[in-house]
């Protein structure tokens, strides 16, 4: 419990005890009206002084019609008509509601607060071979820093010396640690788990991953959803209207009917307490903040409530292929060895391609998984776009595409599977092929299924890849539409066509890498960047940033968005419904102060507690 929350709780306890004592004293003793007034006024000031102070301060700043003003008017009016206990009850229950609000808001902010505390303020810099503790803002790019086990990484850097495991949970929501060795990049905000490592700083503090994320989270509160904007406007006009209505109710009927003012003032007082829009003004923004906090905790950064609301109405999701639905890296997916063993085939191919930096060569060396002994390789000749010839252990090896081996007088086989085939020949004899392909991400199918569950009617893919590769991915994931060989201009046209088909109130979502799809992102209602961890461009370009490479996290974000919107609607309907019923009863004299307090504070507490459910969203 925070200091502010404890302060409110103490005021409530002291006020409640004094109120009970005052009720006993006034019940047992026959006191004049002014003595009772002084007793209950003294009790009232314990929990109510801060409310009176805020009301006066806000009025001085031109902010008249808020909950402090309503509670002040209601309690003063109760004293004026001799309802001393009711005046104290009003302010006590209001403070109870304030306490629940502070606790609920504090819990909802916790996930975001964790993000805003990603990095330490200081770093251990190695200068002249000696560790020196300085502020992170004073560390320059290229300097070496020391991060010990258990410490957070203060700046974006690369491992210069040492080997460790890194906990990225604070950024991505993933509990599985990742290894980091010499040359590997590490992001600020992650926790060093095992060994002490020396890092070389790659970005200044102002441009670090953690800094960008913190800026994004801090700015997310400024972009309000349409529902929040409606509530803000509603409260702006609603509050002065009900104050005027209460004033009319207190004055006009007794003047017309010639009845005592006290009874009608009591009705107006009840009406005024009921009408306070606290439940809406507090709970609806709290629902969205809880949803954003829940998404942040799971590694999905939302730039504003408006994007969370738009995501809840998604009708069409359009996705890029490479790096979004697929790994974006080539892997050996199949081997067919002829006359030699698969192990020997892969070894000869990796050694022959050892001097090449082509992605296919890199994937062969990665699949081989052993250190390349370049002394075993001689007479390397590479023909760009075709293949490589080399002498490996005295054997003449050809590795390349089918045309390259056909030019050498061989007849390579044609694979039936999707992928790029590296054909091999050893000493003029065909030795089979190694198939290399970009593999589908493990959770891509789960992501598509989650979109369906969220009510998305069309899941499409736009890619510049070949039709065969695109259709293979589309068939595996059961996508509704697949468009291959797309240039940037083609993608924009397809997005415009999808937008034209949207139903009223439904939205269009695009998911890509966030760096080279700016024209397409502009056509979408919600742009989502995949794998934004460490990518400034992704964080800047997208409305949602998924900090790891898991497309299923977008399904989780949709589930959070829908639950958040459901909670916000529940609060609106519940609060307005209860208030409307009790307002009518209060206007005709059938509702007393107790019912009014429940319609205000009770409804607020229930709505606030309901809003905190957004923080506990789970998705399977």
Image (spheres, rainbow, N blue to C red):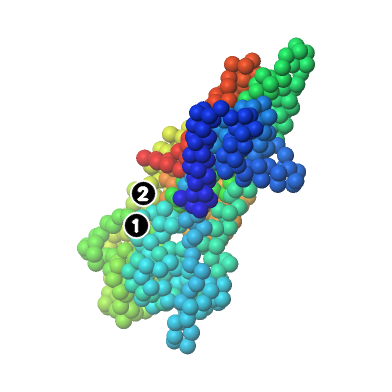
Q: Say which mark, if any, is on residue 154.
A: none
State yes or no: discs 1 and 2 in contact (Cβ < 8 Å): no
Picture coordinates of residue 30, whole percent (x, y): 56, 27
Quadrant of residue 505 within the rendered picture = top right
Q: Say which mark, if any, is on residue 176.
A: 1
Which residue corresponds to mark 2?
442
- Which of these two is toward me, 350 or 503? 503
Residue under the image location 59 percent in, 49 percent down: 220
Q: Up-down: is 322 above or below 155?
A: above
- Which of these two is toward me, 406 or 165? 165
Within 10 Å of disc 2 (Cα), the crowding (few <14, some 14-19, many 20+) is some
Q: CA distance from mark 1 to mark 2?
A: 16 Å
Label located before the other in sequence (1 or 2): 1
On-image quarter of the C terminus: top left
Tell me if residue 52 can be seen. Answer: yes
- Which of these two is toward me, 466 or 510? 510
Residue under the image location 48 percent in, 78 percent down: 133
Picture coordinates of residue 103, whole percent (x, y): 49, 45
Q: Is residue 537 left or right of residue 129?
A: right
Viewer-nearest of discs 1 and 2: 1
């Amino acid at each position: 419990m925070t200091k502010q929350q404890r302060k409110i709780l103490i005021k409530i306890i002291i006020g409640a005890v004094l109120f009970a004592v005052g009720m006993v004293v006034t019940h047992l003793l026959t006191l004049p009206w002014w003595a009772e007034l002084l007793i209950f006024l003294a009790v009232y000031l314990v929990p109510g002084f801060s409310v009176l102070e805020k009301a006066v301060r806000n009025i001085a700043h031109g902010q008249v019609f808020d909950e402090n003003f309503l509670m002040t008017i209601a309690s003063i009016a109760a004293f004026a008509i001799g309802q001393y206990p009711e005046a104290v009850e009003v302010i006590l229950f209001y403070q109870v509601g304030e306490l629940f609000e502070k606790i609920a808001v504090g819990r909802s902010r916790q996930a975001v607060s964790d993000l805003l505390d990603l990095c330490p303020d200081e770093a251990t810099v190695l200068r002249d071979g000696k560790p020196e503790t300085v502020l992170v803002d004073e560390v320059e790019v290229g300097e070496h820093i020391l991060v010990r086990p258990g410490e957070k990484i203060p700046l974006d850097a690369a491992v210069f010396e040492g080997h460790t495991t890194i906990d990225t949970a604070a950024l991505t929501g993933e509990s599985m640690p990742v290894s980091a060795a010499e040359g590997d990049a590490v992001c600020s905000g992650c926790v060093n788990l095992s060994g002490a490592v020396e890092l070389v700083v790659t970005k200044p503090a102002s441009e670090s991953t953690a800094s960008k994320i913190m800026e994004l989270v801090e700015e997310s509160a400024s972009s309000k959803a349409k529902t929040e904007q409606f509530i803000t406007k509603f409260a702006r006009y609603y509050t002065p209207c009900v104050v005027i209505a209460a004033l009319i109710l207190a004055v006009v009927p007794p003047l017309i009917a010639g009845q005592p003012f006290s009874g009608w003032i009591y009705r107006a007082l009840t009406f005024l307490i009921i009408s306070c829009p606290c439940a809406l003004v507090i709970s609806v923004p709290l629902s969205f903040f809880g949803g954003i906090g829940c998404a942040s905790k799971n590694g999905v950064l939302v730039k504003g409530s408006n994007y969370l609301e738009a995501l809840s109405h998604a009708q069409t999701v359009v996705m890029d292929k490479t790096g979004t639905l697929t790994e974006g890296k080539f892997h050996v997916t199949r081997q067919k060895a002829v006359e030699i063993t698969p192990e020997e085939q892969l070894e000869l191919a990796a050694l022959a391609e050892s001097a090449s930096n082509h992605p296919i060569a890199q994937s062969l060396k990665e699949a081989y998984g052993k250190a390349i002994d370049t002394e075993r390789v001689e007479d390397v000749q590479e023909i760009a776009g075709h293949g490589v010839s080399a002498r490996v252990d005295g054997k003449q090896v050809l590795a390349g595409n089918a045309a390259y081996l056909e030019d050498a007088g061989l007849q390579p086989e044609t694979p039936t599977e999707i992928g790029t085939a590296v054909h091999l020949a050893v000493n003029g004899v065909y030795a089979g092929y190694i198939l290399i392909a970009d593999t589908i991400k493990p959770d891509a199918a789960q992501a598509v299924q989650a979109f369906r569950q969220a009510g998305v009617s069309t899941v499409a893919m736009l890619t510049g890849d070949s039709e065969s590769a695109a259709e293979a991915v589309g068939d595996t994931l059961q996508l509704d539409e697949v468009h291959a060989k797309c240039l940037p201009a083609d993608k924009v046209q397809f997005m415009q066509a999808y937008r034209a088909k949207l139903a009223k109130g439904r939205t269009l979502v695009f998911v890509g890498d966030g760096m080279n799809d700016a024209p397409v992102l502009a056509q979408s209602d919600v742009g989502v960047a995949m794998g934004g961890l460490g990518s400034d461009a992704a964080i800047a370009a997208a409305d949602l940033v998924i900090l790891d490479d898991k497309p299923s996290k977008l399904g989780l974000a949709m589930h959070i968005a829908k639950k958040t919107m459901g909670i916000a609607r529940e609060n609106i309907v519940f609060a307005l419904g209860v208030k409307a019923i009790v307002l009518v009863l209060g206007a005709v004299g059938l509702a007393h102060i107790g019912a009014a307090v429940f319609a205000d504070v009770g409804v607020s507490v229930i709505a606030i507690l309901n809003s905190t459910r957004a923080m506990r969203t789970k998705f399977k």
